Image: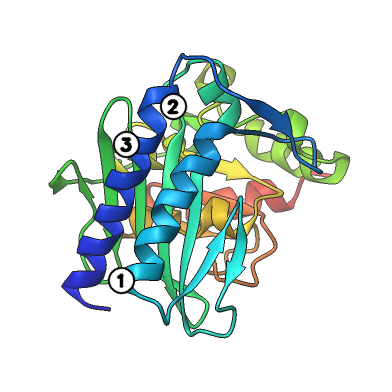
Amino acid sequence: MTPKDIDLAQKLADAAGEAIRPFYRAKFEQEAKGDASPVTEADRAAEAAMRAIIEAERPDDGIIGEEYGPRNEGASRQWVLDPIDGTTSFIAGRPIFGTLIALMQDGFPLIGIIDQPIGRERWIGVVGRPTTFNGQPAKSARCRELKDAVLATTTPHQFDEHDADHFMGLAGKVAPRKIIYGGDCYNYGLVASGHVDVVCEAGLKLHDFAALAPIVDGAGGMMCDWNGEPLHAESDGHVLAIGDQARVDDVLEAIACHH
């Protein structure tokens, strides 16, 4: 990983934003994918723009994209792209979706970007460096007790019965009025900036979480699976973001013990 890789990641985010903004709160084509999740013209235009840049400037690197699949699957360096994480929010005109860009080396994320192209908000995480938000240092918040935490999840309806049971174990330790729904990747940026304390999700795919770990970790928090293990290419999609590392054991205990 070099400074040029960080510059390239930002170039990808710029290109995706340029592709997305004309479609925002406008008329566009949309359809349901095989898993019933929506996809729009904007998703495809943004990923196509990013892939074209990678193919021109890093032809030996791999690409894992949500809309157009893998390229150079055997490459040790992989760019992981989610052009619009939170497509339903985008369709509804809510500016809490984002473009996710990660550079992974041998299955572990080195660079992560969350870019919100409407508000022009950008979090950049790089392993070994402090996370930035629009060029300024981002710092997650301290949380004295789990009952004081702001807990976010996109929607409990996406949990199966087993996962929902464990999520409710965590939710039961938090004040009900401090649980928020919706937000997708934007919630993780809010963890990095100290506004949200814990995010809990299940069923995520690599393109949903690869960019997030360097951002949360570099802001002083921790990203892990529901067993406390670091996230990597083989993680099963059970994801936690915890702003205060002192609360990691509390969160893991809460999510593990509810049956």
What crowding class fits label 2: few (fewer than 14 Cα within 10 Å), some (14-19), or many (20 or more)? Answer: many
User: Mark 3 = which residue?
Assistant: 18
Left or right for 212, reference 11: right
The earlier-in-sequence mark between 1 and 2 is 1
Quarter of the picture containing the C terminus is top right
Left or right for 259, reference 119: right
Quarter of the picture containing the N terminus is bottom left
Q: Is residue 94 above or below residue 146?
A: above
Asked which quadrant contains residue 258, the reply is top right
Residue 57: give its label: 1
Q: Nearer the viewer, residue 155 or 257?
A: 155
* Element marked by disc 1: helix
Task: Tell me what residue is drawn at x 40 percent, y 50 percent.
Answer: 49
Q: Is residue 24 above or below residue 108?
A: above
Task: Tell me what residue is drawn at x 51 percent, y 24 percent.
Answer: 90
Q: Residue furthest left?
A: 136
